[in-house]
Image (tube, rainbow, N blue to C red):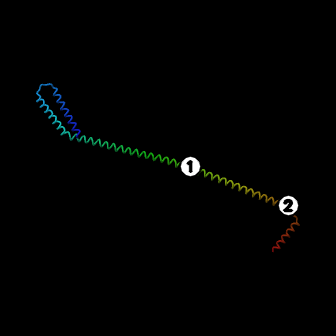
Amino acid sequence: MYKKTRTVLLTSLLLVSMTGVALAAGGGHADSGVLLKDFLWRILNFGCVVAILVYFLRKPLKKGLAGRTEEIEKALAEAKKAKEEAEAKFAEYDRKLDQATEEIAEISDAIRREGELEKQRIIANAKEMAVKIEQDAEKAAELEVAKARRELQQEATALAVELAEGLLKKNFTKDDDARLIDEYMQKVGELH
């Protein structure tokens, strides 16, 4: 308010001094007393007009300027609030982006680890199966060898029995038969 009053007073003083210069430069032969009286009336008239204007326009101007100031302050506050909200949103999105990047890295690492574990499990299963197949093959070979041995033993036994039978038929006589029966009976008799 002080600035406005000072501006009005300075403008009025400048106007009055310019009026005085203009009248002095008039070059007329008028009486200096009349001119001074006219000049003073003009200054009084101007002062009254300024006083009336200040009296009636001060409140509306003050309200208008105060309203405008409030609007500007409100707009600045809203702009500041919007800026803070935008910065908060930016920080939130930046944080979410960082979290998403971390989660992607964690998921990627987990998938890599699971893949490596699956690979190791498959290799272990394959080794176990290879060992089992090898053991099964060894057992099957052993069974086949045992079977072949049994068959060979059976054949050898059958051949031995045949050969013994043939030899006995060829070399064994009735006298040998009687002698064997007597020896057997004697041994049985000794036992009882």
* Residue at 85%, 61% in the rendered image: 167
Residue placed under numbered mark 2 in the picture: 167
State the SS at label 2: helix
Residue 11, picture quadrant: top left
In depth, the one of 46 and 2 nearer the eye is: 2
Q: Residue furthest bottom?
A: 192
* Residue at 56%, 49% in the rendered image: 116
From the image, which quarter does the C terminus lie in? bottom right
Residue 69, compared with residue 118, is above or below; it is: above
* Residue at 69%, 54% in the rendered image: 138
Q: Amino acid at mark 2?
A: Leu
Q: CA distance from mark 2 to mark 1?
A: 74 Å
Q: Amino acid at mark 1?
A: Glu
Labels in figure, total:
2
Q: Which mark is residue 116?
A: 1
Q: Which mark is residue 191?
A: none
